[in-house]
Amino acid sequence: MKQEHIHEIKAIIILALGMILLASLVSFVPEDLPWYSSHPNVPAHNLIRMTGAYMAGSLLFVLGYSAYAFVLFLFFWSWNKFTVKAIRFSFSKIIKVIKSVVINH
């Protein structure tokens, strides 16, 4: 299989994950989860049902509204895989981003 096709398959998987996460974040209702409500909704009101409710709840708990930026990152990463451009990560870049987020808060 050509390397180009492998990149396209990876891009489709990343894009699908981003779309699922976006749908679960947009339709997140805190009452779907037992840790937000003593009587959770059955069935969940999330578009992706309980799995989406747990994914969105966990992402929002850990990242806050930056979870939407994570979804945006997945969309850009997918686009870069389609166009076969490499995203270069380094430890120093990650530290700089975290530092700028913490300082601006």
Image (spheres, rainbow, N blue to C red):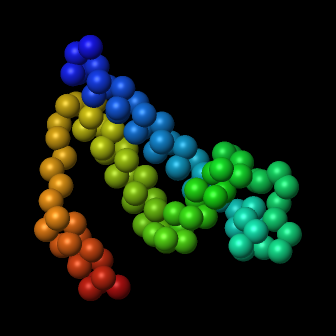
Residue at the extreme front:
1
In the rendering, at what x and y percent does residue 34 appear? 76, 68
Q: Quadrant of residue 35?
A: bottom right
In the rendering, at what x and y percent does residue 20 appear? 55, 43
Q: Is residue 21 above or below residue 78?
A: below
Residue at the extreme top:
1
Q: Quadrant of residue 58?
A: bottom right
Left or right placement of residue 87 versus residue 50 in this view: left
Left or right placement of residue 99 versus residue 15 in this view: left
Foreground residue among 55 and 31: 55
Q: Is residue 48 above or below residue 4?
A: below
Left or right placement of residue 103 versus residue 42 in this view: left
Foreground residue among 68 and 98: 98
Foreground residue among 38 and 77: 38
> For the point 27% across and 74% down, which residue is it?
98
Foreground residue among 38 and 22: 38
In the rendering, at what x and y percent does residue 86 appear? 17, 41
> Which quarter of the rendering shows the C terminus?
bottom left
> For the point 30% across and 77% down, which residue is it?
101
> For the point 85% across and 55% down, which residue is it?
42
In the rendering, at what x and y percent does residue 1 appear? 26, 14
Count of labels shown? 0
